[in-house]
Image (spheres, rainbow, N blue to C red):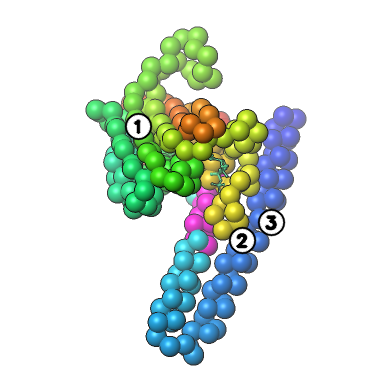
Amino acid sequence: ANDQTARAARLESLGQLAGGVAHDFNNLLAIIVNCAEFIAEEPGEQKAEDLARIRDAAQRGQALTSQLLLFAKREPARVENVDLNSAVTDANDLLGRTIGASITLRCTTYGAALPVRTGRGRLDQVLLNLVINARDAMPGGGIIDVGTDLVEVPEGSILPLPPGSYAELTVSDNGVGMSAEVRNRLFEPFFTTKSAQKGTGLGLATVYGIVIDAEGTITVDSTPGIGTTFRILLPIVAATAETDSTPLSGPGNGAR
Ligand code: ADP
């Protein structure tokens, strides 16, 4: 019965998701169609501007659908052993370009590999979503700290995790922070406080899904006017475990 309730809730959230995505997508397609219609008759400078607009709208469309695919898991999901440190180091460059000049990105990684069981693309999604949210929380500029570490969860810990070794990822900002209401609804699909152009409300729902599938936890610590820290713990897998990609299955898949 519990399973069915989870299923129904999931179907309902997918329905909401489809509605919201259709709406956003329609807006993006309208931009593309309009710009394309006028472009043939335009002088050079205007042409370049409209082409850039088409590209931007198409890119936002791509981001939207790839997030949706990930959330709905229509894409055949592959899991492998991925080093959290390499993911952070490799993403550093892209992230640096994404956040803009008024924001400093600092990365501190643990001194050895932190192999976790998820997908490389998934870790990139997690990092990108958390860093973009941190950027959006600091309109006047600030500092984003991304860190990794090795954490031992002992027997009888208050964390809802079995004892063992975990890879920790923290993303901190000194931005606007959140109210208790926002904190409570953060992981809901479509919950956003951003404008329709900027936010889909899918970012943290996606992150949550990825973390749960990897049998980890995500917590948030936030104070209005001070800043926010997201903390993710993912179980470390033995470095000798097979690294083949296999379809995602197992606990945590149906229930979110
Ligand atoms: P989106 O970014 O599209 O709004 P998310 O699911 O990523 O969707 O985030 C949901 C909401 O959580 C955001 O609209 C914002 O209000 C809040 N939020 C997320 N990260 C932060 C942060 N680092 N600082 C302040 N608020 C945040």
Residue at image position (65%, 51%) is 17
The local secondary structure at tag 2 comes to helix
Q: How crowded is mark 3: few (under 14 residues within 10 Å), some or many (20 or more)?
A: few
Q: What residue type is labelled 1?
A: Gly
According to the picture, the residue beneath numbered tag 2 turns out to be 24
**Vertically, is 166 above or below 206?**
above
Q: Mark 2: is the Cβ under 8 angstroms from ligand 1?
A: no
Residue 146, image quadrant? top left
Whole-percent x, y for residue 72 in the image: 58, 48
The local secondary structure at tag 3 comes to helix
Magenta span: chief secondary structure: helix
Quarter of the displayed picture in which ligand 1 can be seen: top right
Residue at image position (46%, 66%) is 56
Residue at image position (47%, 47%) is 139
Whole-percent x, y for residue 114 in the image: 32, 30
According to the picture, the residue beneath numbered tag 1 turns out to be 147
**Which disc is residue 19 wearing?**
3
- Point out the stretch of residues depicted in magenta: 61-75
